[in-house]
Each structure stands twice: as structure tokens, then as C-alpha cells.
Amino acid sequence: MGDPRREFGAFGEELAAQKLEQSGYQIIERNWRCAAGEIDIVARHRGELVFVEVRTRRGCDPEESITRRKREKLIELGHRYISEHGLDDDGWRIDIVAVGFSGRGVLERIDIWENAIGEW
């Protein structure tokens, strides 16, 4: 038997990936890992490299779980990805996908926030 919390998060990531593709994102990679952590989804959208953090929550607003420390970690991970892949360090952004379920487990919303770190 798997970990229900991890399975719930993976289900949210799958829903987020579908929504991103429907919205014109080209997914390059999922669950990229390095020593510092993980980027949920790496994509291209309108010519930009995009690092996507997926937040899946039940009974509360998923975006509320993005702390200052998490924002800093996402920026660090973006720089590491670019460095490890030999890419240009300009022209990238971090988007957030909030996947919200009711307390009873009914999908209520999937919201994409482009360049979300700049909005916090």
C-alpha cells in the first residue's frame, strides 16, 4: 500500500499537468530532483522556461502553503536547474498551480498563476 498523502499530491500534479497542457504549456520534465530539492514541473510557455510548483490541498486554499522559505527554495532550484542544464539565466519564471479540493474530496478548482513568485 502506498502513502495516501503522496498519492494525493501525485494526483494533483497529474491534474495540474493536464491543465497546463490545455493552457498551451509544453511540459519538458516532471519531478526534477537535485540535492537541494525538487521542481514539480519544468515547461515552456510562450517562449519562456517555466518552473511550476503544484500545491494540492483539501479544505483550504493551496496557495496559502507557499511560505517565504518555499519561495526562496523555488528560486534556488530554478537557478540550479539552469546551471545544471547549461541554459541562459534570463527569461524564466516560476508559476504556481493551485489544485483545491473540498473537505469531502471534490475538485473545486485548478488555478494557474503565472510569474507567481513576483506577486507574493
Image (cartoon, rainbow, N blue to C red):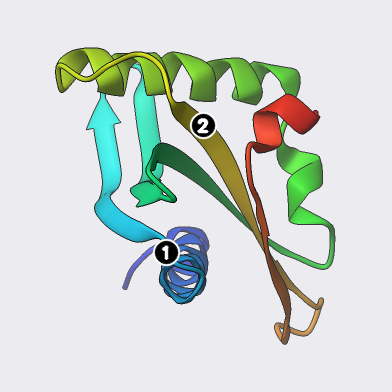
Residue furthest to the front in view is 47
Q: Is residue 63 above or below residue 14?
A: above
The amino acid beneath tag 1 is Ala
Q: Nearer the viewer, mark 2 or mark 1?
A: 2
Label 2 neighbour load within 10 Å: few <14, some 14-19, many 20+: some
**Residue shown at 26% from the left, 32% from the top:** 33
**Residue shown at 66% from the left, 17% from the top:** 69
Residue in the foreground of this view, choosing between 64 and 28: 28
Mark 1 lies on residue: 10
**Residue shown at 48% from the left, 67% from the top:** 4
Residue 2 is situated, as x and y percent measured from the top left of the image, at 34, 67
Q: What secondary structure is marked by label 2? A: strand
Q: Are marks 2 and 1 in contact (CB under 8 Å)?
A: no
Judged left or right of residue 112, residue 41 is left
Q: Give the mark, 2 or 1, whose residue is nearer the N terminus.
A: 1
| Residue 86, quarter of the rendered image | top left
Residue 35 visible in this rendered orientation of the protein: no
- Mark 2–mark 1 Cα distance, whole angstroms, equals 23 Å
Q: What secondary structure is marked by label 1? A: helix
Residue in the foreground of this view, choosing between 21 and 106: 21
Which image quadrant: the C terminus?
top right
Q: Is residue 83 above or below residue 102?
A: above
The amino acid beneath tag 2 is Arg
Which numbered dot is residue 93? 2
Q: Is residue 17 above or below residue 108?
A: above
Residue 75 is situated, as x and y percent measured from the top left of the image, at 51, 18
